[in-house]
Structures are given as structure tokens and as C-alpha cells.
Amino acid sequence: MGKAMPEYVGALDQGTTSTRFVIFNRSGAVVAMDQREHSQIYPQPGWVEHDALEIWAKCRDVIAGALTRAGLTGADLAAVGITNQRETTVIWDRHTGRPIHNAIVWQDTRTDSLIADLARGNGPGDPRDPGGSTGPSDPDRFRSKVGLPLATYFSGPKIRWLLDNVPGARDRAEAGDLLFGTIDTWVIWNLTGGAGGTGAAGDAGGGAKPGIHITDVTNAGRTMLMNLHTLDWDVEMLAVMGVPRAILPAIRSSSEVYGEIAAGAGPGPRNGVLDTVAGVPVAGDLGDQHAALFGQTCFAPGEAKNTYGTGCFMLLNTGTAPVESKSGLLTTVGYRIGGEPATYALEGSIAITGALVQWLRDNLGLIRDSAEVETLARTVEDNGGAYFVPAFSGLYAPYWRADARGVIAGLTRYVNRGHIARAVLEATAWQTREVLDAMNADSGVSLTALKVDGGMVHNELLMQFQADVLGVPVIRPKVAETTALGAAYTAGLAVGYWSALDDLRANWSSDREWHPAMDPARREKEFRLWKKAVTKTFDWVE
């Protein structure tokens, strides 16, 4: 008689500001969760870094913490899935497990001059103009191949920056001594053995099998190095970006058994609870926004979700063929289950949404915690004529303007703290409106409702305003942890914990809906003012 399937599935959700481990049951309900923040490092304006070793330590902490809260051990987990902040870039020594530099975060803009060069055809192996060019800029020159515009957002240019700026890095990379990964790759490598079973700090044991160096199609598709059609690393793009193939992970599907958690994985003191997860399959891997699409069960073409976190990300399932955007969106792999064809998506990426609330808290001190922004915003009836465009890292979809920087427009002596708080929340809703308009134009299908998730969906003032400015219902699911849930679903499917997508659809249910209540004429007037404010951000960086 075979061994009984364990009762639960775990998901390690490594985000931009914190790391969570969430344990789910078969109905997709949260059994337990632990969450820890990590440091944000700003070496100079426009630069954003993370300490990858700190992130790995937080991963260990939250796994142990969630299991302890639930009174469980690793033996109770059928599998673990990984989801992650996507374009954040780590390069480390394969022998010691130590990063050669802090991780460069997706919001970081230090590659702006490199992006400008590449847009003009000036790259180390550029087939258009290998000798460099001062010709016209074409940020979309690789879009048909990789689905992405040239932008500081993506991982490939970050790899190039590290290899060019960390002494000796390029020689070590070409010699096969360095490994690259987005955060999913870094975490899976450490979970499954690290540097020969020693983990990231290289401080235990030795002689064990080294960690598994893989990524999935959703994360690989955000590097500008993966061909969207072959789902493999593209030789031309590697030459253009100056990235040696030897440092790249193998590309796998989003749902399959990659390996097992190794005994004593990672740095730090031994932990009895953590030791029990040894042998648990690591079986799911998705970038965070793709995981939310999957967790929201958007499995049919035309279904969409919007995640409200540090940034805001709307994804629309377009089926098994990529759709090239004409409206400033990204073409991306939505997910791939085992050996089945990949499912593609259109994505609208907004850099700063929840991060703007954090900025209001940490930089200006107008609120003490993020939840207070709704209370403060409710002290006024409207924005008082003020519009806040948070182009802190340039503008992403649908503009892709690296030269933009944030502005507050329409200020008068009438404007007070409440109006600023309201303008901060409205900025998220207006940016989402612009992305939805672009998505409707590209897909030819007008969305009739929007599924939402992420930390900001508990802000009811924002959700009502979002429905008002979109003109369609906004729907929050009962399980709001959809990013972690998507990672759990892919892992559970891979080991047979769930048998089919219909099992997952049956788990989804609505918790709350918001319906449009704003007069359409007022909505369009305010939208025109928002777009006018956006134009004031352009051409700031010379």
C-alpha cells in the first residue's frame, strides 16, 4: 500500500520588501503563515539593492516560523512551490555560495545608459551595428523576439552591469565559476543543496550534492535573454547583452519536480523544525505576477487579474500564442504546466503603487503605518485638485519613459495632508486605468470585471475608486494570498496533490465586489487631468 499524501502544500513567496511562507490545505485555504521584512539598500539615487544572503536567511526563518505556528513539520508538506520578485538579479560564486555583489532590484535604474546604447544598436555583439551607433533609438527592436522593450526593468542589462563593474567578474563567469539567477533560482539552489550541500554561506558539511540551478519560463522570460517562441536562451540576445551562457540556469516549466530540499540547507544555526523539511519536493516556480494569475484561476483566454503590491501588475491570459503589444504592454509567458504548451499573457507593469504609500510613511512621516493612509484620505471628499505621479524609477506601461521622474501637480494653498493621501491612492487607480485601456486596445476584448489581489485590496476606499475610474466591477477573492496560492497550486499539481485545473477553479470564490458609482463625465474629466499631470514627468532626466 502506497504512502498517504501529506495534508498540506507550502509556498515560499519572496517579494520586494518581505518574504512569506504560507501553508495551504486542499481547498486552498491558508493554514498558517509567517512573514519577515528585509532591508532596502539605496546606494545612490535610482539604485536599489538587496542583500541576497539576508533574503536567504529570511526564507529559512519563515519556513520554520509557519510550520511552528501550525504545529506541523516538513512531513506534513506534499510539496513546496516558489514565487518571487522577478527581475531582481543575483550573481554568486558556485563554489562558496557567496554573491559577488548585492542583488540589483527590478526597480533599479543604473543601466539607463546601457539601455540607451542598446536601443541605438551599440552592443558588444550587436548584429545591427557591432561597432556602435549614434543612430535613432529603437527601444522595441527586440520586442518580437523577447516580448519586451529595452528598459532598465529587466535582468539581462543588470547581469551585464555586474559583469562589467565587479572586478574580475567577467573572467570568473567565462571560466564557469559564477552563477546567475533571479531570486527563484537563488532560493531553489540554496534549498536543494547550495554549494555542495553547504548552503549560501558555505559553512556546513560539504561533500553533498550541489544545489539545482534552474529557473522557470516565466522568470526566464523577464531577462530579455529568452526567446519567447523557443522558450530557450537566445544566442543573439546573449551576444547583444554580453552575457556568457555558462552562468545561466536551465529553463524548466512552472510545474514539475525540480528536486528535493536538502538536509541543513542554507547558512545559520541548525533548526529542528527546518531540518524536517529535508526531502520535501520543490515542484513549482513562478514569477510573482504569474503566480497571482494562476492563483486567481485565470486559465481561459480573456481572463485577467491585477495585483496591488510594491508595484501594480495586470495580466491578461491570451492563450497558447504570444500577442505582440502595440500599446506599450509586455508580452510574457503566463505559465507552463509540465510538458503542456505554454500559456501566454499580456502584462501592464506599474513600478510604484504600494511603494508610494511606504514613501509617504518612511520619507515624509505623514502616516505611522500603511493602513493609516485610508483613514487620512477619508478626511477629505476628493483630491483637492492635486495629482501625484510616482515616476520614481521612470514610467513603465504604457509609456516606458526612463527619463521621467515623480511630480505632484495642481498644488494650491487649499491642499492638505488628506488631499495628498488621497492623491497617493488615486495614483494607483489612474495608472491601472491607463494599463486597462492599453489591454483593451491590444486584445480587442473589453474586460467586464477585474479580479484583484495583493496587500492594497484591503483598502476599501481605493477599491471603490478603482471601480469608479475603470467603469467595471472590481472583485476580491476570499483567499487574497493569490501569489503564494499560485505557487502552491503549481507545486501541488506536479506531485498529484491536486489532479487538474478544475480542482483549482472549484476553490475560487468572491469575498467582496465594488461597482462603479462615479458619474462618467466626472471620471473622464479627472482622467484628462491625470494624463496632463503625467506629461509633466517627461524629460526630467537629461
Image (cartoon, helix red, strand yellow):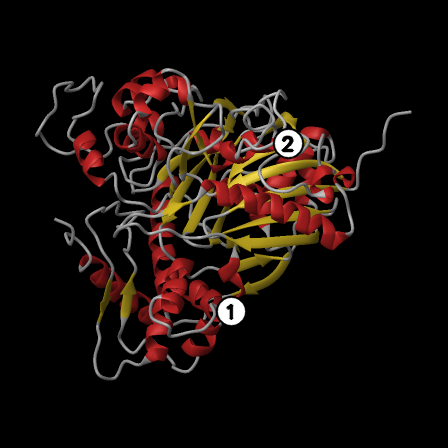
Crowding at mark 2 (Cα within 10 Å: few <14, some 14-19, many 20+): many
Look at label 1 and name its amino acid. Glu
Residue plotted at (17% across, 26% down):
121
* Left or right: 90, with 10 as reference point: left
Using the rendered image of the protein, determine whether residue 473 is visible from the camera's viewpoint. Answer: no
Helix, strand or loop at label 1? It is helix
* Left or right: 196, with 401 as reference point: right
Q: Which residue lies furthest to the left in this view?
A: 134
Look at label 2 and name its amino acid. Val
Where is 341 relative to 300, above or below?
Answer: above
Helix, strand or loop at label 2? It is strand
The answer to which image quadrant residue 337 occupies is top right
x and y, in percent, of residue 494 in the image: 67, 29
Which dot marks residue 460? 1
x and y, in percent, of residue 125 in the image: 22, 18
Residue plotted at (85% across, 29% down):
3
Crowding at mark 1 (Cα within 10 Å: few <14, some 14-19, many 20+): few
The answer to which image quadrant residue 385 occupies is bottom left
Which dot marks residue 282? 2
